[in-house]
Image (cartoon, helix red, strand yellow):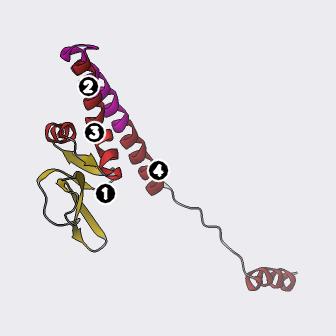
Amino acid sequence: MAVKMRLQRHGSKKRPFYFIVVADGRAPRDGKFIQKIGTYNPLTVPATIQLDRQKALEWLNKGAQPTDTVRRILSFKGVLYLKHLLRGVKLGLFDDATAMTKFQVWHNEHEANVARRNEEHKSKQRAKKAYVPVVKKVETKAEEAAPAAEGSSEA
């Protein structure tokens, strides 16, 4: 049985919301699943992702294959990096404490980058809202002719 980690669509028409699930590869997209490990909401800016790292890591170690989108989500949340570090521990390259220290350093840098990008996005949105286009007054031919006629009659 091929086990996949994939997205299960919920939400109404044109308002997607996804569950990240572990399911049999033969099951339909929105059908039966083994375990729900998180949620993904692409409509918020930035996209909202809630994921149980431990469950995801357990299923990866058991051989579950993530789809492309779920792979990107797992990478963004650091699950794939953690799996990589734990493989190094298993091979004896470094100990568990060093692996967790490396992961914590990566996680802190990643969170800082995400916060910085969110702040940049918010400042751009504020700049867009603050922008008021300057509207030039367009003079018509009638308005141009009227002052000329007034000036000639007075003289």
SS for dot 3:
helix
Q: Please report the residue visible at 30 percent of the width from the left and 31 percent of the height from the top.
A: 81
Q: Give amino acid for label 4.
A: Ala
| Disc nearer the start of the sequence (4/1) | 1
Which of the two residues, 13 or 134, is positioned nearer the viewer here? 13
Which picture quadrant has residue 33? bottom left
Residue 101's label in the rendered image is: none
Q: Which residue is tagged 3? A: 77
| Disc nearer the start of the sequence (2/4) | 2
Task: State the CA–CA distance, disc 4 to disc 1.
Answer: 24 Å
Task: State the CA–CA distance, disc 2 to disc 3.
Answer: 18 Å
Q: Closer to the observer: label 2 or label 3?
A: 2
Please state the horizontal and vertical placement of residue 19, each as a whole percent of the image: 19, 57
Q: Please report the residue visible at 71 percent of the width from the left and 76 percent of the height from the top.
A: 139
SS for dot 4:
helix
Q: Give amino acid for label 3.
A: Lys
Residue 109 covered by magenta stretch: yes
Q: Which residue is tagged 1? A: 42
